[in-house]
Amino acid sequence: MSQQPMRGTRLGSESFEVDTNKNLSPRKVCLYRCSNDHISEMIFSADAEIPVAWGCKSCALEGALLDESGKQAFETEAPKVPRTHFEMLLERRSREELEELLSERLGELKARRARGQADATNS
Ligand SMILES: [Zn+2]
């Protein structure tokens, strides 16, 4: 090991560990399907508790675990649809508050432009 030349590479970017001639711990391949019909393959240790849902590798939805026949293995609730930033914003502030903030900011912007200041400066 110490006789091997050091290889220059980005740290942590890839593993130089080789799988050949090693006894890999038993593992199993699990498939997950999201509502967009993407199939994601995940490999788990054979003795691991398999999660019933896993984040899709192709989109933002959650995939449901499939059994050997390709059917959904468990009944799950409706898939979680990710919320937009705007929806999260609406949970924190009412529309009236947002309108008020918007007109306040627009007023400041107009005043600044009237003074001939560039938009980017914050002073
Ligand atoms: Zn997907």
Image (tube, rainbow, N blue to C red):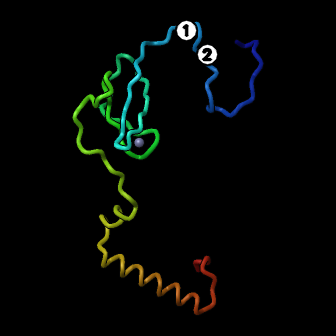
* Crowd tier of the residue under label 1, counting other residues whose Cα lies within 10 Å: few below 14, some 14–19, many 20 or above: few
Residue position for label 2? 18
Image quadrant containing the C terminus: bottom right
Q: Is residue 50 left or right of residue 2?
A: left
How far from the left and from the top, in percent, is residue 28?
40, 18
Q: Is residue 93 left or right of residue 58?
A: left
* Crowd tier of the residue under label 2, counting other residues whose Cα lies within 10 Å: few below 14, some 14–19, many 20 or above: few
Q: Is residue 98 above or below residue 6?
A: below
Q: Residue at x 61, y 16 (%)?
A: 18
Can you tell which quarter of the image residue 67 is in?
Answer: top left
How far from the left and from the top, in percent, is residue 110?
52, 88
Q: Is residue 54 left or right of residue 25?
A: left
Q: Residue at x 57, y 14 (%)?
A: 19
Three-letter code for the amino acid on which mark 1 is drawn: Lys
Residue position for label 1? 22
Can you tell which quarter of the image residue 2 is in?
Answer: top right
Three-letter code for the amino acid on which mark 2 is drawn: Val
**Viewer-side residue, 11 vs 2:** 11
Question: How many marks are shown on the rendered structure?
Answer: 2
Q: Is residue 35 above or below residue 40?
A: below
C-alpha gap between disc 1 and disc 2: 8 Å
Image quadrant containing the N terminus: top right
